Structures are given as structure tokens and as C-alpha cells.
Image (cartoon, helix red, strand yellow):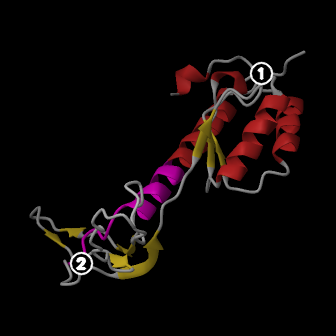
């Protein structure tokens, strides 16, 4: 027999899902946006390491085959993002943008993975988790339907599936994650 969850519990689950989504969005914004609200510095926002070198192409002679190409190193771009406190808004509508550095880190490319509706396909879902790890994703978002009927035993089974997964995981509640499937009234 299915045990129904109270509307307050359902609302709590939705809140947790929305909170997780908000955390993901804020994390991505803090990682990917360049220096916001900081004065422009005279130095460029990125440098090329090593600097590009112009190498003239050889002229075709009997010594050089037409398909030969000179080797040139590929420069890599690096940048630093510095987080600052948001500006204060004054009562007259103006604001004071005094940057207060909170920290900085080098910007690097990153990848994350998104999947959903993982119910009933343990073998396939485990392959997805393995591939996400092999591809080097820094976090995984599951867009919902972790289980079929929102029962505790199903969530425990899903937790067991995820037990060896080591990267950050952000699940969002789907309609199957509730015993009656009626999460729509809370969205």
C-alpha cells in the first residue's frame, strides 16, 4: 500500500529541488562570468601562453613535399575571475559600486552533465554515470524521475546506485518522485 506524503512534505521536496537548482545556477555564474563590478585594469583580461609565434610557410621546393606543414604550438588562454560584493543601492536609486575582493581563481574550461528519468533502467543508468565520470564532468544534474512511485525503498535503491559516484550530484524532483505524481500544484 502506498503511503501518501503530506502537502507540506511535497512542498519541502520541491523547495529542496529548487534550492539545488539555484545553487547550480549560482555556481555556474560565479565560475563563468568575468570580473563583474571591478574597474577595468590596464592589463588584458587574458594572456596567451606561450605567445603566438609567426612562422613563415616554406616555399615549395624539391626538398619539401606539398603536404608538409610546419609545427606551431597552440597558445592557451588563461584568465582570472575575481568575485566582489554587489553594489549597495541608495534610497535615491543610485548605487555605490565599491569592489570588495572576495577571492579569485583561474578560469578553466569545464563540463557538466545533465540527465533525467533514470527509473527502471539500472544497467543503463550505471553506464551513464560511468561515462559522465570518464568524460570529466565536474557535476551532474538529474532533472527528475529518480524513482517510479516516490517510495522510501525506491529512493534507497537509487541511493545505493549512486553510492560509488564521486562527483557532485544535484537531483531535482520530478512528477514520479512523489507518491501521487502531483508535484505540478507546487510548481
Q: Which residue is mark 2?
A: 44
Q: Quadrant of residue 144?
A: top right
Residue 47's place in the image compared with 69, above or below, is: below
Name the main secondary structure of what is drawn in magenta.
helix
Tell me, yes or no, whether the highlighted magenta stretch contains residue 58.
Answer: no
The quarter of the rendered structure image containing the N terminus is top right
Q: Which mark is residue 148?
A: 1
- Secondary structure at badge 2 equals loop
Residue closest to the eye, 73 or 162: 73
- In the displayed orientation, state which residue is furthest to the front: 62
- Magenta region: 22-39
User: Alpha-carbon distance for marks 2 and 1?
Assistant: 53 Å
Q: Looking at the image, which residue is at 53% across and 45% down? A: 21
Quarter location, residue 12: top right
Of residues 146 and 5, the one drawn nearer to the viewer in this rendering: 146
Q: Earlier in the sequence, mark 2 or mark 1?
A: 2
Q: Is residue 105 above or below residue 111?
A: below
Residue at 73% x, 29% y: name it: 118
* In the foreground, 76 or 97: 76
Q: Is residue 74 left or right of residue 89?
A: right
Callout 2–callout 1 Cβ contact below 8 Å = no
Amino acid at each position: 500500500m502506498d503511503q501518501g506524503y503530506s502537502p507540506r512534505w511535497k512542498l519541502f521536496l520541491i523547495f529542496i529541488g529548487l534550492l539545488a537548482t539555484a545553487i547550480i545556477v549560482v555556481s555556474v555564474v560565479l565560475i563563468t562570468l568575468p570580473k563583474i563590478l571591478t574597474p577595468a585594469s590596464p592589463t588584458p583580461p587574458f594572456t596567451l601562453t606561450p605567445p603566438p609565434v609567426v612562422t613563415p610557410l616554406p616555399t615549395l621546393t624539391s626538398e619539401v613535399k606539398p603536404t608538409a606543414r610546419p609545427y606551431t604550438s597552440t597558445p592557451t588562454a588563461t584568465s582570472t575571475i575575481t568575485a566582489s560584493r554587489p553594489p549597495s543601492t541608495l534610497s535615491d536609486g543610485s548605487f555605490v559600486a565599491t569592489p570588495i575582493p572576495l577571492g579569485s581563481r583561474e578560469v578553466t574550461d569545464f563540463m557538466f552533465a545533465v540527465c533525467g528519468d533514470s527509473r527502471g533502467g539500472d544497467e543503463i543508468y550505471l553506464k551513464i554515470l560511468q561515462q559522465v565520470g570518464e568524460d570529466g564532468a565536474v557535476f551532474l544534474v538529474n532533472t527528475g524521475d529518480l524513482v517510479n512511485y516516490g517510495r522510501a525503498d525506491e529512493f534507497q535503491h537509487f541511493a545505493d546506485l549512486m553510492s560509488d559516484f564521486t562527483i557532485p550530484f544535484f537531483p531535482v524532483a520530478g512528477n514520479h518522485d512523489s507518491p501521487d505524481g502531483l508535484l505540478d500544484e507546487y510548481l
